[in-house]
Image (cartoon, rainbow, N blue to C red):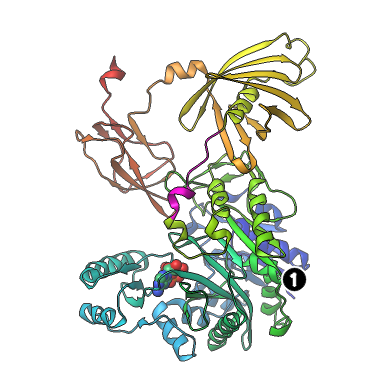
């Protein structure tokens, strides 16, 4: 076994790898960018080496600096985590040339699976079922159109170098083929520098089921499947193992195909073979097809760990250090059911806009697994993936595991940034999901219903008002002040103002008036009970009050200072600001142009996504304050609208 390894990653995966290494007696070296000096993975590691500025291209993608750090600290091997350099064969080669061990597959195996067309051809030869389609060299327009015709519509055009759903187009009619081909090619060229495409049969009601494999360079085993059909724009949201409706025949067929795929390329280490499955009539062993192989540990590997009781990072270290496969196929257990939900800093109602911010509070309930790279007070920075944590639960059956998932989400307390927690809770309660009727279109079909955020109830509003009005804690509290203290307050919640009057009538007794409603409040050992209900735990952080309402959701309220309010009235409604640091990709309006509320005015590229910034109201553009191509800070004014007469008056 290695004595010391370097972890070439950050966030939850770096922490997760470091924890297993330490449990195995292996020392660890972290690397970090300027943005991560105080990060959790740095604190966990035995040693840490700075490798550059915050943007990944200047730090976590700098293979040469990372190899240098490993050599300087005496690490013998490098664990790449996922993302960053994990599937870069040139990096693997450089690691090996430096006399170090790469904890993962060979450069050749990564290359073999790197392009979708070559991988499909290779898999076909190895006897692995591939989606019917064309993946040849002839890229002439009419040849590809002919191939689509022969396959039969609907078809999917895919970039051979694709990833993250880029360069992918569904085409339903021959008439639309030429236009879709042109746009897929240009997107692929822009994103991957390779415009080549392949054509596939479009599978209706598809399910994404992937098989975890493990190889030692000669032999391979599989660790069963994961169902990752709950996707939003091809991004996984909740994953589970086993796949709902899985039969022993189907599992055997998929497992054997995945093992054939791994052995065909002499695979070593952890890998995932992704299949697309036609789920329109249940699962059938002749209705699954190879999509691609990910030659690294996957984000969702913990569900496999939960149902097998194995530690995949331990397996990675053992195999990379020269041991054979720890278990034979028939020794690998499969027990119960597991789910993983991905908690993100993102604004769901705003179209899943990635969010940033300092986490005022982050706590997970006991008895579940939460993989995270951040703690209370840490910042979700704009430079990296905005995932806060993965919440993993296990139960004897799918129903038990799902009720644990619901409970775990309700008891997760996160404040300081907007998150997708309410969305995850809606998804975990979705009736189709509950009965295991999953397919990759589920989220898209029911998006409107899944993204409705529940309103803050009157007792929650009252709880926030009580916290805002609370007399100071301390020896004098409740002594001098209990002479029927009456306070009038205003809170702001989701752009709306909530005015209330709080009357403290005695220790632990109060009345809260909101509009026409009067709510009686009593304090007991668990906090305030308001109008007979327990609205949830309350956390005050400066001028912000968070109410953790469990199943009802988490709500944040800002205490409005009456003086600020008078001074700030109407301000900023005429300026379009960058919601986060990013690159101005396009400015869609010109000075003097009349615009209407909601009209797109600019496109900002931030956190690997494009965000459309819209006019806050009807009006006329007064001034463009940023040019396309400029990097801007959060809060930078980009476009100013003319003042309206009302504001001037
Ligand atoms: P990428 O590498 O860009 O992520 P994949 O080939 O992995 O692309 O496909 C991403 C997702 O697109 C899959 O998880 C599935 O939801 C959908 N998809 C892929 N191929 C097909 C197909 N032939 N028919 C229907 N949906 C597909």
Rendered view: 556 above or below 108: above
Residue 227: where, in percent of width, then height? Answer: 56, 68
Quadrant of the image where one finds ligand 1: bottom left
Q: Residues within 10 Å of mark 1 (few under 14, many from 20)?
A: some
| Residue identified by numbered label 1 | 3
Q: Is residue 69 covered in magenta? A: no
Q: Is residue 333 left or right of residue 419?
A: right
Magenta-drawn segment: 446-456
| Front residue (pair 373, 450) | 450
The question of residue 448 being in magenta is answered with: yes
Residue at (53% x, 64% y) in the render: 437
Residue 15 in sight in this render: no
Locate the C terminus by quadrant.
top left
* Residue 208 in view, yes or no: yes
Front in this rendered view, residue 73 or 15: 15
Q: Residue at x 58, y 78 (%)?
A: 105
The residue carrying mark 1 has its beta carbon less than 8 Å from ligand 1: no
- Front residue of 156 and 189: 156
Of residue 246 and residue 571, the one placed in the foreground of this image is: 246
The residue at the point 43 percent across, 69 percent down is 205
Residue at point 61%, 60% (across, down):
340
Q: Position of residue 414 (x, y in %)?
A: 62, 43
Tell me which corner region of the image, top left, top right, bottom left or bottom right, holds residue 591. top left
613 relative to 533 in the view: left or right: left
Q: Residue 627 in the image: state x and y as whole percent.
A: 29, 43
Q: Is residue 632 above or below residue 245?
A: above
State whether the magenta stretch is mostly helix, strand or loop.
loop
**Split into 4 quadrants, where in the image is the N terminus?**
bottom right
């Amino acid at each position: 076994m290695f004595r010391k390894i370097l972890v070439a990653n950050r966030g939850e995966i770096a922490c997760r790898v470091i924890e297993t290494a330490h449990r195995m007696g292996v020392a660890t070296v972290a690397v970090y960018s300027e943005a991560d000096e105080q990060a959790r993975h740095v604190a966990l590691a035995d040693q840490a080496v700075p490798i550059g500025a915050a943007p990944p291209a200047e730090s976590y993608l700098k293979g040469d600096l990372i190899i240098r750090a490993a050599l300087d600290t005496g690490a013998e091997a490098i664990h790449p985590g996922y993302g960053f350099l994990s599937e870069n064969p040139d990096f693997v080669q450089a690691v090996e040339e430096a006399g170090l061990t790469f904890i993962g597959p060979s450069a050749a195996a990564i290359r073999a699976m790197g392009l979708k067309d070559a991988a499909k051809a290779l898999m076909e030869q190895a006897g692995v079922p591939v989606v019917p389609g064309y993946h040849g060299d002839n890229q002439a327009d009419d040849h590809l159109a002919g191939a689509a015709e022969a396959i039969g519509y609907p078809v999917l055009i895919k970039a051979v170098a694709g990833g993250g759903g880029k360069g992918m187009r569904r085409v339903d009619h021959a008439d639309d083929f030429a236009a879709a081909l042109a746009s897929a090619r240009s997107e692929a060229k822009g994103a991957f520098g390779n415009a080549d495409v392949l054509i596939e049969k479009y599978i209706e009601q598809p399910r994404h089921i992937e098989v975890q494999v493990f190889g030692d360079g000669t032999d391979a085993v599989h660790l069963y499947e994961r169902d990752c059909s709950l996707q939003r724009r091809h991004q996984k949201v909740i994953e589970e193992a086993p796949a709902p409706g899985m039969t022993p025949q189907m599992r055997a067929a998929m497992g054997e195909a995945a093992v054939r795929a791994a052995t065909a390329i002499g695979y070593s280490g952890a890998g995932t073979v992704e299949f697309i499955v036609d789920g329109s009539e249940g699962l059938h062993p002749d209705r699954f097809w190879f999509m691609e192989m990910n030659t690294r540990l996957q984000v969702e590997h913990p569900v496999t760990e939960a149902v097998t009781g194995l530690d995949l990072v331990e397996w990675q270290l053992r195999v990379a250090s020269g041991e054979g496969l720890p278990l034979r196929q028939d020794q690998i257990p499969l027990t119960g059911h597991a789910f993983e939900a991905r908690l993100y800093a993102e604004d769901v109602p705003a179209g899943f806009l990635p969010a940033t911010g300092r986490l005022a509070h982050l706590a997970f309930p006991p008895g579940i697994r939460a993989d995270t790279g951040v703690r209370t007070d840490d910042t979700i920075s704009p430079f990296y993936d905005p995932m806060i944590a993965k919440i993993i639960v296990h139960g004897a059956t799918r129903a038990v595991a799902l009720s644990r998932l619901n409970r775990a989400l309700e008891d997760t307390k996160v404040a300081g940034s907007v998150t997708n927690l309410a969305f995850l809770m809606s998804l975990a309660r979705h009736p189709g999901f509950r009965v295991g009727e999953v397919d990759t279109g589920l989220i898209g079909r029911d998006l409107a219903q899944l993204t409705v955020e529940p309103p803050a109830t009157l007792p929650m509003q009252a709880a926030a008002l009580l916290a805002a009005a609370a007399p100071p804690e301390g020896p004098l509290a409740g002594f001098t002040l209990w002479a029927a203290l009456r306070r009038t307050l205003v809170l702001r919640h989701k752009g709306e103002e909530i005015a209330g009057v709080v009357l403290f009538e005695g220790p632990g007794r109060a009345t809260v008036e909101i509009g026409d409603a009067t709510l009686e409040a009593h304090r007991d050992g668990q906090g305030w009970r308001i109008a007979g209900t327990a609205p949830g735990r309350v956390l005050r952080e400066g001028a912000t009050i968070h109410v953790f309402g469990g199943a009802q959701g988490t709500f944040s309220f800002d205490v409005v200072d009456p003086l600020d309010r008078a001074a700030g009235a109407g301000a900023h409604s005429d300026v379009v600001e960058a919601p986060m640091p990013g690159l101005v990709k396009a400015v869609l309006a010109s000075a003097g142009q009349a615009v209407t509320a909601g009209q797109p005015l600019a496109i900002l590229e931030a956190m690997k996504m494009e965000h459309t910034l819209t006019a806050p109201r009807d009006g006329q553009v007064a001034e463009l304050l940023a040019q396309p191509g400029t990097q801007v800070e959060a809060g930078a004014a980009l476009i100013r609208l003319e003042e309206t007469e009302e504001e001037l008056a």
